[in-house]
Amino acid sequence: MSLTVQLQTMLAMVAMGGWLGIAIDTYSRLIRGRHWNKWITVINDSLFWILQGLFVFFVLLQINEGEMRFYILLALLCGYSCYRALLYTIYIKVLEAIIQGTIKTYKFIKSAIFILVINPTKEILKFLYKLCMMLLSFLITVIFFLLKVVYTPFLWVCKGIWRLMPKEKLQKFKNKLGFFTKMKNYIMRWFTKKGS
């Protein structure tokens, strides 16, 4: 490697060391602070370090075709140490401000959606439900009224015909009805005894 490439590699690895510090702190704040299952934590940690390793190697590949030297590791450690010494406090404050700002924005949007969309929708649905029930009640009342209007003259006609019929025929009809009622009761009692 030429001196220019070596210098570029060193600077890039110092920057990557700083990046690793930022990534570790962000990951710790967002993911590791939560109470995950043990296996989920192991999987998350493994994926995190695999992705960081691939990212560092990708940067190294772009600069010196992926050639590893001992001083590259030293540059990474140097970059990480510089971040911890100089930028850690500032970055944590900025990260916390971003997280709190995101949470407040989310809560504001959620409240706005509830106030502007969900609550009015609920009220509209309640109003429509009440309106439908009122219309249904009105329709049932109208239907019963119309049935009564149709049924009442029919009942009058039937009563008139019943009164015009001879008394003897009416008595025979009643006797027949009584006979059928007795037969029905007898059959029902017989089936009840059989069942018991």
Image (tube, rainbow, N blue to C red):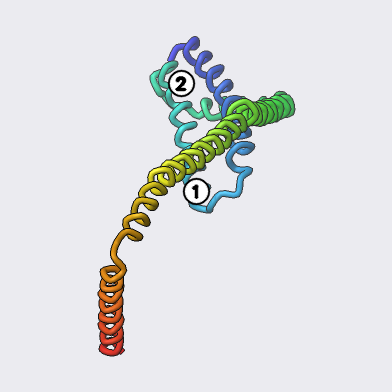
Crowding at label 1, few (<14), some or many (≥20) Cα neighbours within 10 Å?
few
Percent coordinates x, y for residue 171 in the rendering: 30, 73
| On screen, residue 10 above or below 191 | above
Q: Which residue occupies the foreground of this view, 66 or 141? A: 141
* Quadrant in the rendering for residue 144: top left
Report the residue marked by disc 1.
Answer: 40
Residue at image location 35% in from the left, 51% down from the top = 157
- Picture disc at residue 9: none
Mark whose residue sits in front, 1 or 2: 1
- Which disc is residue 59 wearing? 2
Above or below, comparing residue 180 to residue 58 in the picture: below
Quadrant of the drawing holding the N terminus = top left
User: In what quadrant of the picture does the C terminus appear?
Assistant: bottom left
- Secondary structure beneath dot 1 equals helix
**Observer-nearest residue: 47 or 96?**
96
Question: Left or right: where does residue 175 sit relative to residue 107?
Answer: left
Label 2 packing within 10 angstroms: few (<14), some (14-19), many (20+): some
Secondary structure under the numbered disc 2 in the rendered image: helix
- Kindly give the residue lying farthest to the top in the view shown: 4
Where residue 122 appears, as percent x and y from the top left, is 58, 35
Question: Of the residues shown, which amino acid type is indicated by label 2?
Answer: Val
- Which percent across, then down, holds residue 102? 65, 27
* Residue at point 57%, 31% (across, down): 124
Q: Residue 24, position in %: x, y?
A: 59, 34
Residue, x 38% and y 52% (percent of image)? 155
In the rendered view, would you say 67 is above or below 157? above
Q: Earlier in the sequence, mark 1 or mark 2?
A: 1
Q: Is residue 163 at least partly visible in the picture?
A: yes
